[in-house]
Each structure stands twice: as structure tokens, then as C-alpha cells.
Image (cartoon, helix red, strand yellow):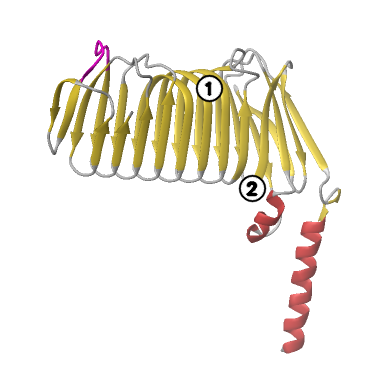
Amino acid sequence: MKRILVIFLIITGAYIAWNYIFDGSGVNFAQAEDAVKVTDQTKNITIDVSSVETMIVPEDRDDVRAELKGKGTVKVDKHGNEIEVAVKRKGFFWFNWFEMEKTTLTVYIPEDYEKNMEIELGSGEVVFKGHSVDSPMKLKELAIDIGSGRMVLENLDVETYVHHSSSGEVEINSVAAGSGSFEVSSGSVNVKNYSGKLDADVSSGELEIQMDSLRDDVDLNVSSGNIELDLPDDTDFTLNGKISSGDLSSDFPLENKEETDNRLSGKHGSGKYKINADVSSGNIEIF
């Protein structure tokens, strides 16, 4: 019986070693790449990654190209009017932490694409930046879904931004949106230099947003966790706050201020835009 167990362990160990040292086509850390041409019919690009360090790079090109360095394979597939980029990892999942540092993915996209994009991050890291503040990457809709890991977004101009975080860490800088919705159920989201309509719902975790200017209404809802909203001093807004538990505060001087245990309201400046804040638990701070 012991001999059978020893043989089993040797075979299992050999399988693990082979799987992590060799990849069907050669030695670990081989390069793999794939590409699909973007056409007028292409409406959506989906990037689905986990346990990989990923860079999304806009440049002058007419295809979506993905280059993987490390363990695994990358596929760029076309399904109707959608292009999907996905990485397949091999081996036992409990070793993924070891390979995450050694596997990198670079996804090149057309800088003039200007349609829809979805990024799904299970773990690992994604960095997606436009060229500069003055030359941002433009998209019709950008949808983000983060299970865990870390994501950095910078220099983007989108009509619609949809964000869902169930865990992880997100840093966003210089994003202009016609409308933006943030749903944070855990983890932390830090946003700087944001402009556009804002709808935020935090059930746990932390959302910090610094806005360059207030151009539309803002809706904030906290059932647990924390929202910090940093606005310019000359912002014009009317605050309508409801509190069932937790805390709602504003550092701005308010005209016609009404403050009770369950309500905080008033006007700052001309009162042009509405800030609706609802706290059922947790904290909302406006400053």
C-alpha cells in the first residue's frame, strides 16, 4: 500500500513539474500572440483576464492584438460584432500566485476605436491609459467588473462609464463621462479629476471621488462603508440628504440649511445641480 502511495505521489509531482516548467510548445515563459481585425461592424471589445499583469495600449492600428509572455495561452476571437480577448492558464490554481509575477499580457487596440469596451478582472492587475489628458482614449461605453486584484484607469473620455467592484483596489485619474455609475460592494475605489454625471452605490468598502467640476446631478447611496466626495470650492449645488443610520456631513456653507438626526439639506452657490445623498449605514462626507 505504501509503495502505491509513493508511486502516486511521484507521478503527481512529475505532472506538476511538467505543467509548470513546460508548456506544450516548449519551455515556460514562451511568447504567444493572436490578433483580429477591427471592422465597422465591431461594436464591443471584451478583455477577460485573471492572475495576469495586463497592459491595454491604444495605438495607431486596425486590429486588436494580444501578446502574452509567460505561462498559458491567449486567444483573440471574433463573435458576431464582438472581439474577445481571453487568457487560459494551465496548472493547479493554488500555484497561480507564483506565476502571476511572471506572466504579462499586452493588448493593443485601435486608438480611434470609439465604441464599447468591457474589462473583467478576476485577479492580477490591469492598466489602461489614454495617451494624455489632452489626448484621451474615447469610448462610447466602458464597463468594468472587478472580482479582485488591482486596476488603473487614466486619460479616458467616455459617454457611459459602468463600474462594479466586489473586491480589489481601483485607481482612476482624468476620466470624463457623460454619465458614470459606481457600484462598490467591497474593496476601495479612488477617483481623481472626474467630471460628469455621477451615481454611486456603496454597500461596503470605500469610494473616494475628486471632481474637477460639477456638471450634472449626483446621487450617492451608502448602506455600509464610506463615500468621500471632493468638490471645487465654487461648486453650485442643492443638497438633499437623508440619514437612517450612520453619518452625512458637508464642509460647504449652506443657505437655507436644515439639519436634524435624519436630514441634511441646503443650497451652496446658485444651487444649480442636485446632490441626493442617502445613508442607511456608514458615512458620506462632502467637502
Q: Secondary structure at mark 2?
A: loop
Is residue 119 toward the left or the right of residue 105 in the image? left
| Start-end of magenta stretch | 267-273
Residue at 51 percent across and 18 percent down: it is: 158
Other-residue count near label 2 (Cα within 10 Å), few / some / many at <14 / 14–19 / ≥20 = many
In the image, is residue 151 above or below residue 155? below
* Dot 2 amino acid type: Ser
Measured as percent of width and height from the top left, residue 88 is found at 68, 45
In front: 90, or 147?
A: 147
In the image, is residue 193 above or below residue 282? above
Is residue 201 toward the left or the right of residue 60 in the image? left
Which image quadrant for residue 195?
top left
Disc ID at residue 51: 2
Is residue 79 toward the left or the right of residue 208 in the image? right
Measured as percent of width and height from the top left, residue 207 is found at 41, 37
Disc ID at residue 34: none
Q: Nearer the viewer, mark 2 or mark 1?
A: 1
Which image quadrant for residue 110?
top right
Measured as percent of width and height from the top left, residue 56 is found at 66, 29
How many numbered badges does the structure rendering display?
2
Residue at 83 percent across and 45 percent down: it is: 30
Disc ID at residue 174: 1
User: Which quarter of the rendered picture does the N terminus lie within?
Assistant: bottom right
